[in-house]
Image (cartoon, helix red, strand yellow):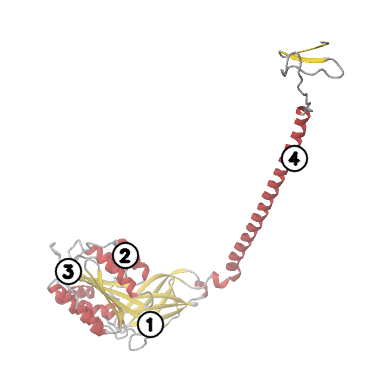
Amino acid sequence: MTAARWRLPSLALVVLACSAAMTSGTAHAAERHIARVTIVGSDLEVLFSAGTSGARLNPASVKVELAGQPVHATARDISAAASKAELRTVVLLLDTSGSMKGAGIDAAKRAATAFLNSVPADVRVGLVAFSSAPGPVLLPTLNRAQIRAAVARLVAQGETALYDGLAVALRQVGSVGQRRVVLLSDGADTTSITSLSAVASTLSRSGTVLDAVGFQTSEKDTPALALLTKAGAGRLVGTGNAADLAAAFRTAATAFTSQLLVTVPVPTPLAGRDVTLKVTAGTAKQMFSDEVRSKLPGGSAAASPVVTGAVPQRSLLLLFVGLVGLFIGILLFAWLGTDLTSAKRRDKSRMTKVVSQYTHYPRVEVPPTTTALGTNQIARERPSSGPETLCTAGAWTSGSR
Protein backbone atom coordinates (compact mmCIF):
# COMPACT_ATOMS: atom_id res chain seq x y z
CA MET A 1 0.00 0.00 0.00
CA THR A 2 1.35 3.44 -0.92
CA ALA A 3 -0.81 5.57 1.40
CA ALA A 4 0.77 7.03 4.52
CA ARG A 5 0.40 4.58 7.38
CA TRP A 6 -0.76 5.41 10.87
CA ARG A 7 1.08 3.17 13.25
CA LEU A 8 -0.98 1.73 16.05
CA PRO A 9 0.70 0.95 19.41
CA SER A 10 2.84 -2.15 19.43
CA LEU A 11 1.52 -5.34 20.94
CA ALA A 12 3.63 -4.84 24.06
CA LEU A 13 2.06 -1.44 24.71
CA VAL A 14 -1.42 -2.86 24.11
CA VAL A 15 -0.81 -5.61 26.66
CA LEU A 16 0.48 -3.07 29.19
CA ALA A 17 -2.56 -0.86 28.61
CA CYS A 18 -4.91 -3.81 29.12
CA SER A 19 -3.10 -4.77 32.33
CA ALA A 20 -3.39 -1.24 33.64
CA ALA A 21 -7.12 -1.25 32.90
CA MET A 22 -7.71 -4.24 35.21
CA THR A 23 -8.70 -2.81 38.56
CA SER A 24 -10.54 -5.74 40.13
CA GLY A 25 -8.76 -8.81 38.80
CA THR A 26 -11.24 -9.28 35.95
CA ALA A 27 -9.99 -9.74 32.38
CA HIS A 28 -10.30 -6.97 29.83
CA ALA A 29 -13.99 -6.52 29.00
CA ALA A 30 -13.46 -6.34 25.24
CA GLU A 31 -12.51 -10.00 25.03
CA ARG A 32 -15.22 -12.67 24.95
CA HIS A 33 -14.85 -15.81 27.05
CA ILE A 34 -18.08 -17.65 26.26
CA ALA A 35 -17.13 -19.24 22.96
CA ARG A 36 -20.25 -21.35 22.42
CA VAL A 37 -23.61 -22.21 24.04
CA THR A 38 -25.32 -25.46 23.03
CA ILE A 39 -28.60 -27.03 24.13
CA VAL A 40 -28.16 -30.70 25.04
CA GLY A 41 -31.44 -32.24 26.15
CA SER A 42 -32.67 -30.17 29.10
CA ASP A 43 -29.18 -28.76 29.84
CA LEU A 44 -27.00 -25.96 28.52
CA GLU A 45 -23.41 -26.69 27.53
CA VAL A 46 -21.14 -23.65 27.64
CA LEU A 47 -17.62 -23.54 26.22
CA PHE A 48 -15.69 -21.08 28.40
CA SER A 49 -12.17 -19.91 27.57
CA ALA A 50 -9.53 -17.86 29.37
CA GLY A 51 -8.97 -16.05 26.08
CA THR A 52 -5.53 -14.82 25.21
CA SER A 53 -4.39 -14.57 28.83
CA GLY A 54 -3.08 -18.13 28.80
CA ALA A 55 -4.34 -18.65 32.37
CA ARG A 56 -5.14 -22.19 33.47
CA LEU A 57 -8.79 -22.15 34.53
CA ASN A 58 -9.87 -24.04 37.64
CA PRO A 59 -13.11 -26.03 37.04
CA ALA A 60 -14.02 -25.63 40.74
CA SER A 61 -14.06 -21.84 40.33
CA VAL A 62 -17.02 -21.83 37.92
CA LYS A 63 -20.14 -19.89 38.89
CA VAL A 64 -23.21 -19.58 36.67
CA GLU A 65 -26.20 -17.25 36.77
CA LEU A 66 -29.43 -17.47 34.76
CA ALA A 67 -31.56 -14.32 34.73
CA GLY A 68 -29.53 -13.06 37.70
CA GLN A 69 -30.16 -16.21 39.76
CA PRO A 70 -27.23 -18.45 40.81
CA VAL A 71 -27.71 -22.00 39.52
CA HIS A 72 -25.89 -25.29 39.92
CA ALA A 73 -23.30 -26.16 37.24
CA THR A 74 -20.44 -28.59 36.68
CA ALA A 75 -17.27 -27.99 34.65
CA ARG A 76 -14.46 -30.03 33.20
CA ASP A 77 -11.19 -29.08 31.55
CA ILE A 78 -11.14 -29.79 27.82
CA SER A 79 -7.63 -28.52 27.12
CA ALA A 80 -5.53 -30.71 24.87
CA ALA A 81 -3.95 -32.53 27.80
CA ALA A 82 -7.31 -33.22 29.45
CA SER A 83 -9.72 -34.15 26.69
CA LYS A 84 -9.95 -34.48 22.93
CA ALA A 85 -13.70 -34.81 22.79
CA GLU A 86 -14.17 -31.16 21.72
CA LEU A 87 -13.32 -30.50 18.07
CA ARG A 88 -11.20 -27.34 17.78
CA THR A 89 -10.35 -25.66 14.49
CA VAL A 90 -8.55 -22.48 13.48
CA VAL A 91 -7.88 -20.99 10.05
CA LEU A 92 -4.98 -18.61 9.45
CA LEU A 93 -6.13 -15.87 7.07
CA LEU A 94 -3.07 -14.10 5.68
CA ASP A 95 -2.83 -11.00 3.49
CA THR A 96 -0.43 -11.66 0.60
CA SER A 97 -1.21 -8.53 -1.47
CA GLY A 98 1.55 -6.59 -3.18
CA SER A 99 1.86 -4.14 -0.28
CA MET A 100 3.16 -7.02 1.87
CA LYS A 101 6.27 -7.53 -0.30
CA GLY A 102 9.64 -7.70 1.39
CA ALA A 103 9.71 -7.44 5.17
CA GLY A 104 5.93 -7.72 5.46
CA ILE A 105 5.51 -11.17 3.92
CA ASP A 106 8.60 -12.46 5.75
CA ALA A 107 7.16 -11.25 9.06
CA ALA A 108 3.80 -12.88 8.21
CA LYS A 109 5.51 -16.22 7.60
CA ARG A 110 7.37 -16.02 10.91
CA ALA A 111 4.16 -15.13 12.71
CA ALA A 112 2.32 -18.10 11.20
CA THR A 113 5.18 -20.39 12.21
CA ALA A 114 5.09 -19.02 15.77
CA PHE A 115 1.36 -19.74 15.91
CA LEU A 116 1.87 -23.33 14.74
CA ASN A 117 4.55 -23.83 17.42
CA SER A 118 2.23 -22.55 20.16
CA VAL A 119 -1.21 -23.94 19.35
CA PRO A 120 -2.15 -27.25 21.06
CA ALA A 121 -1.55 -30.39 19.03
CA ASP A 122 -5.24 -31.38 18.90
CA VAL A 123 -6.26 -28.14 17.15
CA ARG A 124 -6.79 -28.48 13.42
CA VAL A 125 -5.17 -25.64 11.49
CA GLY A 126 -6.07 -24.46 7.99
CA LEU A 127 -4.70 -21.73 5.74
CA VAL A 128 -6.31 -19.16 3.44
CA ALA A 129 -4.11 -16.56 1.72
CA PHE A 130 -5.65 -13.68 -0.20
CA SER A 131 -4.42 -11.08 -2.66
CA SER A 132 -6.53 -10.21 -5.72
CA ALA A 133 -8.56 -13.33 -4.88
CA PRO A 134 -8.49 -15.99 -2.15
CA GLY A 135 -5.83 -18.65 -2.60
CA PRO A 136 -3.95 -20.79 -1.91
CA VAL A 137 -6.24 -22.66 0.46
CA LEU A 138 -5.29 -25.55 2.72
CA LEU A 139 -8.10 -27.35 4.54
CA PRO A 140 -7.81 -27.65 8.35
CA THR A 141 -5.49 -30.49 9.31
CA LEU A 142 -3.43 -31.81 12.22
CA ASN A 143 -0.43 -32.15 9.90
CA ARG A 144 1.75 -29.24 10.99
CA ALA A 145 4.45 -29.98 8.41
CA GLN A 146 1.91 -29.60 5.61
CA ILE A 147 0.81 -26.21 6.94
CA ARG A 148 4.41 -25.01 7.35
CA ALA A 149 5.23 -25.97 3.78
CA ALA A 150 2.17 -24.08 2.47
CA VAL A 151 3.15 -20.98 4.48
CA ALA A 152 6.72 -21.09 3.16
CA ARG A 153 5.44 -20.97 -0.45
CA LEU A 154 3.43 -17.75 0.00
CA VAL A 155 4.25 -14.87 -2.36
CA ALA A 156 3.12 -11.24 -2.05
CA GLN A 157 1.45 -9.77 -5.13
CA GLY A 158 -1.81 -8.27 -6.41
CA GLU A 159 -4.67 -6.42 -4.71
CA THR A 160 -6.45 -7.02 -1.38
CA ALA A 161 -9.60 -9.21 -1.44
CA LEU A 162 -9.95 -9.27 2.34
CA TYR A 163 -13.72 -9.86 2.52
CA ASP A 164 -13.65 -12.62 -0.10
CA GLY A 165 -10.80 -14.27 1.81
CA LEU A 166 -12.75 -14.15 5.07
CA ALA A 167 -15.81 -15.64 3.39
CA VAL A 168 -13.66 -18.59 2.22
CA ALA A 169 -12.09 -18.98 5.68
CA LEU A 170 -15.54 -19.18 7.30
CA ARG A 171 -16.47 -22.01 4.97
CA GLN A 172 -13.21 -23.84 5.65
CA VAL A 173 -13.43 -23.60 9.44
CA GLY A 174 -16.70 -25.56 9.41
CA SER A 175 -19.66 -25.45 11.78
CA VAL A 176 -18.76 -28.00 14.47
CA GLY A 177 -16.89 -27.48 17.73
CA GLN A 178 -14.86 -24.42 18.69
CA ARG A 179 -13.86 -22.36 15.66
CA ARG A 180 -11.53 -19.38 15.24
CA VAL A 181 -10.06 -17.36 12.41
CA VAL A 182 -6.79 -15.46 12.94
CA LEU A 183 -6.46 -12.65 10.39
CA LEU A 184 -3.36 -10.69 9.39
CA SER A 185 -3.81 -7.73 7.05
CA ASP A 186 -1.96 -4.51 6.31
CA GLY A 187 -4.79 -2.52 4.77
CA ALA A 188 -8.31 -2.11 3.53
CA ASP A 189 -10.11 -4.29 1.03
CA THR A 190 -9.70 -3.12 -2.58
CA THR A 191 -11.22 -5.74 -4.85
CA SER A 192 -13.64 -8.14 -3.09
CA ILE A 193 -16.95 -9.15 -4.59
CA THR A 194 -18.30 -9.79 -1.07
CA SER A 195 -19.31 -6.66 0.84
CA LEU A 196 -18.17 -5.80 4.36
CA SER A 197 -21.73 -5.92 5.73
CA ALA A 198 -22.41 -9.30 4.13
CA VAL A 199 -19.30 -11.02 5.46
CA ALA A 200 -19.76 -9.42 8.91
CA SER A 201 -23.31 -10.77 9.05
CA THR A 202 -22.14 -14.25 8.03
CA LEU A 203 -19.38 -14.12 10.65
CA SER A 204 -21.79 -13.07 13.39
CA ARG A 205 -24.26 -15.87 12.60
CA SER A 206 -21.56 -18.54 12.32
CA GLY A 207 -20.42 -18.41 15.93
CA THR A 208 -16.79 -18.31 14.76
CA VAL A 209 -14.40 -16.10 16.73
CA LEU A 210 -12.26 -13.69 14.70
CA ASP A 211 -8.96 -12.30 16.03
CA ALA A 212 -7.27 -9.76 13.77
CA VAL A 213 -3.78 -8.30 13.66
CA GLY A 214 -3.49 -5.01 11.77
CA PHE A 215 0.04 -4.66 10.47
CA GLN A 216 1.00 -1.03 9.75
CA THR A 217 -2.65 -0.27 8.96
CA SER A 218 -3.69 3.33 8.38
CA GLU A 219 -6.30 5.08 10.49
CA LYS A 220 -8.87 4.85 7.70
CA ASP A 221 -8.36 1.08 7.39
CA THR A 222 -8.90 0.27 11.07
CA PRO A 223 -12.75 0.66 11.30
CA ALA A 224 -13.39 -2.25 8.92
CA LEU A 225 -11.18 -4.57 10.97
CA ALA A 226 -12.79 -3.32 14.18
CA LEU A 227 -16.27 -4.05 12.80
CA LEU A 228 -15.24 -7.57 11.79
CA THR A 229 -13.64 -8.44 15.15
CA LYS A 230 -16.75 -7.13 16.90
CA ALA A 231 -18.94 -9.36 14.73
CA GLY A 232 -16.60 -12.26 15.52
CA ALA A 233 -16.43 -11.51 19.27
CA GLY A 234 -12.64 -11.39 19.06
CA ARG A 235 -9.76 -8.93 19.47
CA LEU A 236 -8.09 -6.44 17.17
CA VAL A 237 -4.40 -5.83 17.79
CA GLY A 238 -2.46 -3.27 15.81
CA THR A 239 1.27 -3.20 15.36
CA GLY A 240 3.64 -1.26 13.16
CA ASN A 241 6.60 -3.47 13.95
CA ALA A 242 7.17 -6.68 11.99
CA ALA A 243 8.90 -8.19 15.02
CA ASP A 244 5.67 -7.92 17.03
CA LEU A 245 3.66 -10.06 14.61
CA ALA A 246 5.05 -13.33 15.94
CA ALA A 247 4.21 -12.29 19.51
CA ALA A 248 0.68 -11.38 18.44
CA PHE A 249 0.15 -14.78 16.82
CA ARG A 250 1.58 -16.63 19.82
CA THR A 251 -0.90 -14.73 22.00
CA ALA A 252 -3.76 -15.73 19.69
CA ALA A 253 -2.71 -19.38 20.02
CA THR A 254 -3.11 -19.24 23.81
CA ALA A 255 -6.90 -18.95 23.37
CA PHE A 256 -6.90 -22.74 22.98
CA THR A 257 -4.70 -23.58 25.95
CA SER A 258 -7.26 -23.39 28.77
CA GLN A 259 -10.94 -24.11 28.21
CA LEU A 260 -13.78 -25.44 30.31
CA LEU A 261 -16.92 -27.23 29.20
CA VAL A 262 -19.62 -26.09 31.63
CA THR A 263 -22.87 -28.09 31.97
CA VAL A 264 -25.86 -26.18 33.36
CA PRO A 265 -29.06 -28.09 34.28
CA VAL A 266 -31.90 -25.64 33.63
CA PRO A 267 -34.26 -25.14 36.61
CA THR A 268 -37.89 -25.90 35.76
CA PRO A 269 -39.18 -22.35 36.50
CA LEU A 270 -36.74 -20.93 33.93
CA ALA A 271 -37.28 -23.57 31.24
CA GLY A 272 -38.10 -22.18 27.81
CA ARG A 273 -37.25 -18.58 28.70
CA ASP A 274 -34.89 -16.19 26.92
CA VAL A 275 -32.53 -15.02 29.67
CA THR A 276 -29.06 -13.63 30.34
CA LEU A 277 -26.48 -16.34 30.94
CA LYS A 278 -23.47 -15.28 33.01
CA VAL A 279 -20.42 -17.47 33.60
CA THR A 280 -17.46 -16.66 35.84
CA ALA A 281 -14.30 -18.74 36.19
CA GLY A 282 -10.59 -18.24 36.72
CA THR A 283 -7.56 -18.92 38.83
CA ALA A 284 -6.52 -18.01 42.37
CA LYS A 285 -5.19 -14.67 41.08
CA GLN A 286 -7.52 -13.71 38.26
CA MET A 287 -11.18 -14.19 37.43
CA PHE A 288 -12.86 -13.99 34.02
CA SER A 289 -16.53 -13.25 33.44
CA ASP A 290 -18.75 -13.10 30.39
CA GLU A 291 -22.48 -13.05 29.65
CA VAL A 292 -24.74 -13.65 26.66
CA ARG A 293 -28.45 -13.88 25.93
CA SER A 294 -29.57 -17.48 25.59
CA LYS A 295 -32.79 -19.36 24.88
CA LEU A 296 -33.19 -22.04 27.53
CA PRO A 297 -34.44 -25.55 26.68
CA GLY A 298 -37.74 -26.93 27.93
CA GLY A 299 -40.62 -24.68 28.87
CA SER A 300 -44.12 -25.07 27.45
CA ALA A 301 -42.94 -27.69 24.97
CA ALA A 302 -41.96 -30.02 27.84
CA ALA A 303 -44.45 -28.94 30.52
CA SER A 304 -47.57 -28.86 28.35
CA PRO A 305 -47.30 -31.48 25.63
CA VAL A 306 -51.07 -31.42 25.06
CA VAL A 307 -51.04 -27.70 24.32
CA THR A 308 -48.14 -27.90 21.90
CA GLY A 309 -49.65 -30.97 20.28
CA ALA A 310 -53.00 -29.21 19.83
CA VAL A 311 -51.58 -26.87 17.24
CA PRO A 312 -50.76 -29.52 14.61
CA GLN A 313 -53.98 -31.45 15.40
CA ARG A 314 -56.08 -28.33 14.86
CA SER A 315 -54.18 -27.63 11.68
CA LEU A 316 -54.89 -31.13 10.39
CA LEU A 317 -58.59 -30.77 11.29
CA LEU A 318 -58.81 -27.45 9.45
CA LEU A 319 -57.06 -28.98 6.47
CA PHE A 320 -59.49 -31.92 6.44
CA VAL A 321 -62.54 -29.64 6.71
CA GLY A 322 -61.16 -27.47 3.94
CA LEU A 323 -60.66 -30.45 1.62
CA VAL A 324 -64.17 -31.77 2.34
CA GLY A 325 -65.62 -28.32 1.66
CA LEU A 326 -63.69 -28.08 -1.59
CA PHE A 327 -64.95 -31.53 -2.68
CA ILE A 328 -68.56 -30.61 -1.87
CA GLY A 329 -68.16 -27.33 -3.73
CA ILE A 330 -66.92 -29.14 -6.83
CA LEU A 331 -69.90 -31.55 -6.70
CA LEU A 332 -72.38 -28.67 -6.32
CA PHE A 333 -70.76 -26.81 -9.18
CA ALA A 334 -70.93 -29.88 -11.41
CA TRP A 335 -74.57 -30.56 -10.45
CA LEU A 336 -75.63 -26.96 -11.00
CA GLY A 337 -73.83 -26.90 -14.33
CA THR A 338 -75.61 -30.06 -15.47
CA ASP A 339 -78.98 -28.78 -14.23
CA LEU A 340 -78.55 -25.45 -15.99
CA THR A 341 -77.61 -27.19 -19.23
CA SER A 342 -80.70 -29.42 -19.01
CA ALA A 343 -82.90 -26.40 -18.24
CA LYS A 344 -81.53 -24.56 -21.25
CA ARG A 345 -82.23 -27.55 -23.47
CA ARG A 346 -85.80 -27.83 -22.12
CA ASP A 347 -86.43 -24.11 -22.65
CA LYS A 348 -85.08 -24.30 -26.18
CA SER A 349 -87.28 -27.29 -27.01
CA ARG A 350 -90.37 -25.57 -25.55
CA MET A 351 -89.66 -22.38 -27.51
CA THR A 352 -89.20 -24.34 -30.71
CA LYS A 353 -92.61 -25.95 -30.26
CA VAL A 354 -94.27 -22.60 -29.58
CA VAL A 355 -92.69 -20.94 -32.59
CA SER A 356 -93.56 -23.88 -34.86
CA GLN A 357 -97.28 -23.32 -34.16
CA TYR A 358 -97.02 -19.97 -35.89
CA THR A 359 -94.58 -20.77 -38.66
CA HIS A 360 -95.53 -24.25 -39.93
CA TYR A 361 -97.59 -24.39 -43.13
CA PRO A 362 -98.24 -27.49 -45.30
CA ARG A 363 -96.44 -27.31 -48.56
CA VAL A 364 -98.79 -27.55 -51.60
CA GLU A 365 -97.28 -28.65 -54.86
CA VAL A 366 -99.01 -26.91 -57.81
CA PRO A 367 -97.86 -28.37 -61.11
CA PRO A 368 -97.29 -25.87 -63.92
CA THR A 369 -99.72 -25.84 -66.85
CA THR A 370 -99.80 -24.41 -70.37
CA THR A 371 -102.46 -21.80 -70.94
CA ALA A 372 -103.14 -19.00 -73.34
CA LEU A 373 -100.68 -17.03 -71.23
CA GLY A 374 -98.06 -19.68 -71.77
CA THR A 375 -96.07 -21.32 -69.05
CA ASN A 376 -95.70 -18.20 -66.91
CA GLN A 377 -95.72 -19.10 -63.24
CA ILE A 378 -98.52 -16.68 -62.66
CA ALA A 379 -100.83 -18.98 -64.60
CA ARG A 380 -102.26 -21.81 -62.56
CA GLU A 381 -104.61 -24.62 -63.42
CA ARG A 382 -108.15 -24.09 -62.21
CA PRO A 383 -108.96 -26.44 -59.42
CA SER A 384 -111.45 -29.19 -60.07
CA SER A 385 -113.89 -27.59 -57.69
CA GLY A 386 -114.21 -23.97 -56.76
CA PRO A 387 -113.28 -20.83 -58.59
CA GLU A 388 -109.87 -20.23 -60.12
CA THR A 389 -107.57 -17.97 -58.16
CA LEU A 390 -105.18 -15.68 -59.92
CA CYS A 391 -102.37 -13.68 -58.33
CA THR A 392 -101.51 -10.69 -60.44
CA ALA A 393 -99.37 -7.77 -59.43
CA GLY A 394 -99.76 -8.76 -55.80
CA ALA A 395 -103.67 -8.69 -55.86
CA TRP A 396 -106.03 -11.60 -55.48
CA THR A 397 -109.21 -11.94 -57.75
CA SER A 398 -111.66 -14.75 -58.24
CA GLY A 399 -114.31 -15.53 -60.84
CA SER A 400 -114.97 -17.58 -63.95
CA ARG A 401 -112.77 -17.24 -66.93
Nearer to us in this view, 88 or 285: 88
Residue under pointer 1:
86
Of mark 4 and mark 2, the one earlier in the sequence is: 2
Nearest to viewer (mark 3 / mark 2): 3
Residue 149 in view, yes or no: yes
Residue under pointer 4:
346
Of helix, strand and loop, which one carries label 1?
A: loop
Q: Whole-Å distance between the Cαs marked 4 and 2?
A: 74 Å
Q: Whole-Å distance between the Cαs marked 4 and 1?
A: 84 Å
Nearer to us in this view, 291 or 335: 335
Nearest to viewer (mark 2 / mark 1): 2
Tell me which amino acid carries mark 3: Gln
Q: Residue at x 72, y 41 (%)?
A: 345
Nearer to us in this view, 95 or 158: 158
Residue under pointer 2:
199
Dot 1 surroundings within 10 Å: few (below 14), some, or many (20 or more)?
some
Of mark 2 and mark 1, the one earlier in the sequence is: 1
Q: From the top left corner, tell me how far across and down residue 342 is, in percent.
A: 72, 44
Contact? badges 2 and 1 (CB < 8 Å): no
Tell me which amino acid carries mark 4: Arg
Tell me which amino acid carries mark 1: Glu
Q: Residue at x 82, y 15 (%)?
A: 388
Locate residue 242 relative to residue 339 in the image: left or right.
Answer: left
Looking at the rendering, in which quadrant would you find the C terminus?
A: top right
Of mark 1 and mark 3, the one earlier in the sequence is: 1
Residue under pointer 3:
157
Dot 2 surroundings within 10 Å: few (below 14), some, or many (20 or more)?
many
Q: Whole-Å distance between the Cαs marked 1 and 3?
A: 38 Å
